[in-house]
């Protein structure tokens, strides 16, 4: 299927399923979406888990993306030791993982991200960060790297949710911070658990395959549309928004 046709069909499905509502806010995941930071997170987890002698694969770490650090540690502890980590272990190991991450070279901005953000901001959308991360090294860079886009009180992080992704709470809170219904939001995500969280909240969910996880996994997690990169979203964001807002004229038959 041609990409434009796919966008048009996804937007049709979206409008038909929940009724027509203009999009008023954009909810952005951070790691693997705004920053090409996932290889560094995977390396930092790998270093920690190797030290703890917990068997793991590098690729599986990408599947845990979106979960809070504590949830990831508990999942691995349960698998290996058959128990949750204590709160003390959780904070000690997450602190170590964060330190290992910070020792690595700074993660680059995802190519295409500034274009997408600037377009959405100029289109009048409220932009909200919805990250499972509690690591300040990247959160603190947002205002510097994307000037005028993010606002301190418009950020959902691991600090202000009870349930991390794939629970819908982070994206529901993101929509609430924007003062709109999730049905008036687009969400941009790169990980299956994040896509599931966004999709369950009711936002139109755009999955980006920016790492080793195949498009099919994001579609299965509930993505309304899957694009191969943030740059591809930059190239198509105007068309997507116009389709969702039904301002776009029917596409010519290709
Ligand atoms: Mg992500």
Image (spheres, rainbow, N blue to C red):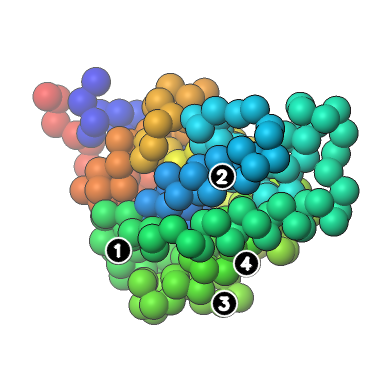
Callouts 1 and 4 close, C-beta under 8 Å: no
Q: Earlier in the sequence, mark 3 or mark 4?
A: 3
The answer to which of 196 and 178 lies nearer the viewer is 196
* Residue 178 pos. (x, y %): 57, 66
Camera-near label (1 vs 4) is 1
Q: Earlier in the sequence, mark 3 or mark 2?
A: 2
Spatial CA span between label 1 and label 4: 22 Å
Q: Which mark is residue 152?
A: 3
Disc 2 C-beta below 8 A from ligand 1: no
Disc 1 C-beta below 8 A from ligand 1: no
Q: Is residue 220 left or right of residue 171?
A: left
Q: Which residue is mark 1?
A: 114
The answer to which of 95 and 203 lies nearer the viewer is 95
Q: Earlier in the sequence, mark 3 or mark 1?
A: 1
Q: Which residue is mark 2?
A: 47
Spatial CA span between label 3 and label 1: 18 Å
Residue at figure coordinates x 82%, y 30% from the top left? 81
- As helix, strand or loop, the secondary structure at mark 2 comes to helix
Residue 45 visible in the snapshot:
yes
Label 1 crowd (10 A; few <14 / some 14-19 / many >=20): some
The answer to which of 67 and 207 lies nearer the viewer is 67
Quarter holding residue 73: top right
Label 3 crowd (10 A; few <14 / some 14-19 / many >=20): few
Camera-near label (2 vs 4) is 2
């Amino acid at each position: 299927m041609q990409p434009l046709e796919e966008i048009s069909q996804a937007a049709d499905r979206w409008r038909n399923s929940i009724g027509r509502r203009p999009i008023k806010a954009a909810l952005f995941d951070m790691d693997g979406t705004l920053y090409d930071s996932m290889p560094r997170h995977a390396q930092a987890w790998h270093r920690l888990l190797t030290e703890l002698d917990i068997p793991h694969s590098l690729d599986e770490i990408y599947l845990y993306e979106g979960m809070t650090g504590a949830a990831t540690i508990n999942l691995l502890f349960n698998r290996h030791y058959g128990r949750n980590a204590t709160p003390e272990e959780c904070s000690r190991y997450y602190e170590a993982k964060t330190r290992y991450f910070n020792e690595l070279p700074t993660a680059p901005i995802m190519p295409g991200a500034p274009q997408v953000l600037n377009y959405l901001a100029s289109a009048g959308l409220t932009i909200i960060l919805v990250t499972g991360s509690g690591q300040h090294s990247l959160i603190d860079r947002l205002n510097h790297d994307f000037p005028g886009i993010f606002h301190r009180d418009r950020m959902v992080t691991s600090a202000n949710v009870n349930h991390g992704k794939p629970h819908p709470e982070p994206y529901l809170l993101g929509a609430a911070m924007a003062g709109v219904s999730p049905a008036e939001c687009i969400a941009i995500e790169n990980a299956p658990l994040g896509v599931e969280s966004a999709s369950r909240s009711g936002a139109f969910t755009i999955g980006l395959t920016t790492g080793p996880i195949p498009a099919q996994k994001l579609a299965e997690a509930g993505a309304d549309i899957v694009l191969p990169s943030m740059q591809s979203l930059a190239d198509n964001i105007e068309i997507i928004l116009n389709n969702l807002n039904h301002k776009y004229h029917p596409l010519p038959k290709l």
